[in-house]
Amino acid sequence: MSRIALVTGGMGGLGEAICIKMAALGYTVVTTYSPGNKKWEEWLATMKEQGHEFHAYPCDVASYDSAQECIARITKEIGPVDVLVNNAGITRDMTFKKMDKAAWDDVMKTNLDSVFNMTKPVCDGMVERNWGRIINISSVNGQKGAFGQTNYSAAKAGMHGFTKALALEVARKGVTVNTISPGYIGTKMVMAIPQEVLDSKIIPQIPMARLGKPEEVAGLVAYLASEEAAFLTGANIAINGGQHMS
């Protein structure tokens, strides 16, 4: 029986690349979509045409109750989650002076609370089975900060604090917990940035002089989920083309 990998926010960009990579390696892949997303069936059909059989469940990752219900359905209908990739996230960028409480709360709930919400109902099962992988997708801006992103940078930095503490608690049970911090990746969201801004403001910050590829991050996720990564836990792995080194 293949292991089950759950990727939150898997319908597009980085999440889609992770789903495709995990499926190619033989995992049974499940993803979540926002309850208001009306295109999830279209996405599943498109993926199926490309040869990818995914499962999708509605889940508001910012809601503890919704996460509990989602995981319960997945466990009943597909099986227990072996690999959890906490990938879902949003931005509400603005200077701190202009930032209101709603912009702070929205980002914290979706980017940080979601990590607790989704991990809580799967972690005990991983411990009981003596095997599990929890992979948290953070950001280079959680390491170095970013203008106009006090909410996003704080949430993404918080993800790694969660990683380190939980990694200590479950290390002896065959469960690893790690963080990946991507830099600027060539997703649809990033590619929507005007080319002149990419060329003048973003690319010059990257020593490799290019954007990362979603497939490169997906490959790192696949490694962390593998048997070969069993001795790697509590780490924050930067994949940013040299933009920020720590």
Image (spheres, rainbow, N blue to C red):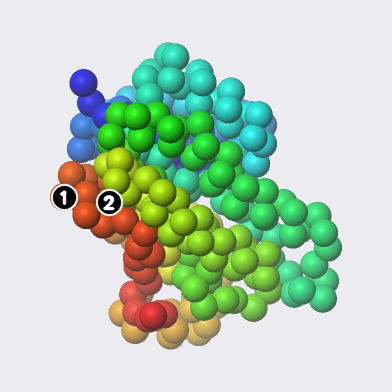
- Would you place residue 175 above or below residue 106 in this image? above
- Would you place residue 161 above or below residue 65 in this image? below
- CB within 8 Å, label 1 to label 2: no
Residue 179 in percent (x, y) is at 40, 58
Mark 2 is surrounded, within 10 Å at the Cα level, by few (under 14), some (14 to 19) or many (20 or more) other residues, namely many
Q: Nearer the viewer, residue 165 or 52?
A: 165
Task: Tell me the amino acid under the disc marked 2.
Answer: Leu
Evaluate whether residue 48 shows in this view.
no
* Residue depicted at 67% across the width and 48% down the height: 109
Task: Tell me the amino acid under the disc marked 1.
Answer: Glu
Residue 217 in percent (x, y) is at 33, 57
* Residue depicted at 57% across the width and 76% down the height: 145
How far apart are the alpha carbons under marks 1 and 2? 8 Å
Which quarter of the figure is the C terminus placed in? bottom left
Residue picked out by circle 1? 228
* Residue depicted at 69% across the width and 60% down the height: 92
Q: Nearer the viewer, residue 198 or 124?
A: 124
* Residue depicted at 56% across the width and 61% down the height: 158
Which quarter of the figure is the N terminus placed in? top left
Q: Nearer the viewer, residue 25 or 120?
A: 120
Dividing the picture into quarters, in which one does residue 197 lie?
bottom right
Q: Nearer the viewer, residue 195 or 47?
A: 47
Residue picked out by circle 2? 224
